[in-house]
Amino acid sequence: MSPAEQDWQPAASHDALRLRARILGRIRAFFAARDVLEVETPVLSQAANADPAIASLAVQGMGWLHTSPEFPMKRLLAAGSGAIYQIARVFRGGEQGRYHNPEFTLLEWYRPGFDHHALMDEVAGLVAELIPASPANPPRIPYRDAFLDFAGFDPFQASLGQLRRVAGDIVGEVVGLGEDRDAWLDLLFSTVVQPRLPAVCFVVDFPATQAALARLSARDPRVAERFELFIGGVELANGYHELSDAVEQARRMELEHRRRQTSGLPLNPIDVRLLAALRSGLPDCAGVALGLDRLIMLAGEYTHIDQVLAFPWSRA
Amino acid sequence: MASYSTSEFRGGLKIMIDGDPYTIVENEFVKPGKGQAFNRVKIRNLRTGRVIERTYKSGESVEAADVLETDLQYLYNDGELWHFMQPESFEQYAVGEQALGDAAKWIKDQDICQVTLWNNEPISVTAPNFVNLTITETDPGMRGDTSGGGGKPATLETGAVVRVPLFVQTGELIKVDTRSGEYVSRVKDE
C-alpha cells in the first residue's frame, strides 16, 4: 500500500468531531440570541491579500482563495447589512505546524456601533461559554506593558541593535530577518512574551506599524485600536476598531504592495471594490476573527491542530 | 547546489550550516496571524553530535547536505583505521577514530553497522543495538554477594567493560545493549 492509502482514516477522534459540531451549534445560538446575521461570502476572489506576511493561494485560470472573509464582509456592512458573522474556511499558503493548517476555519464577526473594547467584552462572553475555565473579564494588557513585564524592554524605544541582542540571548541565532524591526518584534513577542502571558488575556494597543486594518488611537497615534486574545499562550483572535477611512486604507495597501515588491513577493490585484465600499461609507464598527480550530483545541485540551481536523492537509 | 526552503523542513532533513552537515531534530512553525512567520529548529551536528537551536525567517533557503545513512559491514582494524565494506557493491570505506566514536567499544568483524556518509566520507558509525561478545576477564568468585544487586565488572573481547551478574563467568558469550552499555543476558551456544 502506498503511504497515501495507509492514512485514509480521519486524524481527529470521534470525540473531537463531536466537540466541533457542538461548538458550531453553540456559536450559532450565541449570535442568533444577539440578532447577528449569519452570512456567506465567496471563497474564490478576484483579488488577493496584499499583506506581505500572508500568502494567497492562486486557483489556475481563476483568482485566489480568500485568506479571510474580511473585505466582502466590509462591503456588506457598507451596504447596510447591520451586525454580521461568518464561519468561513480560509486558506493561507505555507502555514503548517502545531497550530497551523493551510486550510482552516475562521469565525469572523462585525458589530456596528461597537468599539474594540465593547467587542472584547463580547469575545470574552463567547469564549467563556465555550471554554468553561475561561474568565468572563480577562485582563487587557497593552502591548508595551507585555514587553516591559515579560521581556524587560520597551518595544517602542528599543533600537534594532537591542532587539537583535535580546533575540541572540534568548532565542539563539536568527537567520534572514535583516533590518525589519517589526519582524524582530514579532519574533520576540512569539517566543518570549507570548509563553509568559496570563492564562487568558487580551493584548491591546499594538504599535501603529502593526495596525493592519485597525484605526489609530485618537488619544495616542503611536498605537492602533487593535486587540488579540491569548489563551494558554495561544493566539486565538485578532480584532480591530475598524479603519473606515478609504484614503488611509488605500495608503496602507500601497505600503504593503511596496513591501511585497522589495521582498520579491507576487504583486496581486488589490481589492478595489473594498476601497469603493469604504469611500461610500463603512459604518463605525469593530470586527474580530477567531481561529475556530484553535478554540476547539483549547476546549478539548488537544495539543496539535491535526487532532481537531477530520483530514489535515497531510491527508486531505 | 541543492537547497531546501523552510517549508520543506522536517525531522531528519540533512542541511549544511557553517560548513558542517546537520540533521533536523525538531522543526516548529511559528507565526503570528498578522506578522512574520518563522521556523524554529533544533539541529544536530552530524560530526560532533552537538544539538543547537536556530530560527529562520520562513521562506529562507538552506543548502542541502549530501548525507546518506547506509549499512556497512565491519571488516578489520589496521591499527589506525577501521575498515568497512558495502555488502552489495563491495566498496570499502576507512573510518578514523573520531568518526567511529563509541562504536569502537562494541563492534567486531562481520558486524553490520549504520554508517553516515557525507560526500561519500564516513562521519559517524552506530553499532548494532545488540551485540554478542565473549567475556575475556571477570572475577570468578561469588564475592560480594550481599544481594546489593550491583554485579561485577567484566572485560569483553573488544576491551569494553560492562557490569554482569555474579554467576556469569570468563569465557561466556553475553548479549549487550550498546545504547545503554548494559548486560542483557547470557547467549547459549547454538
Image (tube, rainbow, N blue to C red):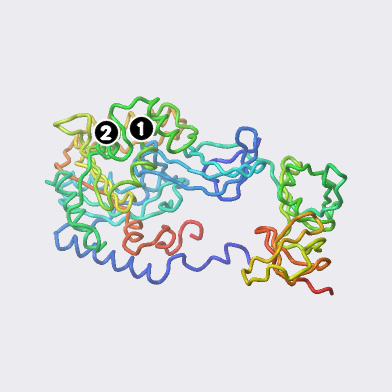
Element class at badge 1: helix
Q: Chain of mark 2?
A: A
Q: Residues within 10 Å of mark 2 (few under 14, many from 20)?
A: many
Left or right, A304 with reference to A139 = right
Amino acid type indicated by mark 2: Pro
Camera-nearest residue between A59 and B131: B131
Determine the secondary structure under disc 2: strand
Identify the residue at image location x=60%, y=36%. Answer: B17
Above or below residue B10? Residue A212 is above
Q: Chain of mark 1?
A: A
Are callouts 2 and 1 both on one chain? yes
Which of pointers 2 and 1 lies earlier in the amino acid sequence?
Answer: 1
Residue under the point 22% across and 29% down: A222
Quarter holding the C terminus of chain B is bottom right
Report x, y in % for residue A246: 22, 33
Name the side, left or right, on which A98 lies relative to B145.
left
Q: In the drawing, what numbered circle is on residue A311? A: none
Residue positioned 57% across, 62% down in the render: A4
Name the image quarter holding residue A189: top left
Marks 2 and 1, how far apart at CA: 9 Å
Residue pictured at 78% horizontal, 63% vertical: B138
Task: Kindly identify the amino acid type of the residue bearing the numbered disc 1.
Answer: Asp
Please provide percent x and percent y for residue A273.
27, 39
Q: Residue A73, relative to residue B188: is it above or below?
A: above
In-front residue for pair A263/B117: B117
Q: Nearer the viewer, residue A122 or A56?
A: A122
Residue designated by label 1: A182
Q: Are marks 2 and 1 in contact (CB under 8 Å)?
A: yes
Residue A207: numbered disc:
2
Q: Residues within 10 Å of mark 1 (few under 14, many from 20)?
A: some
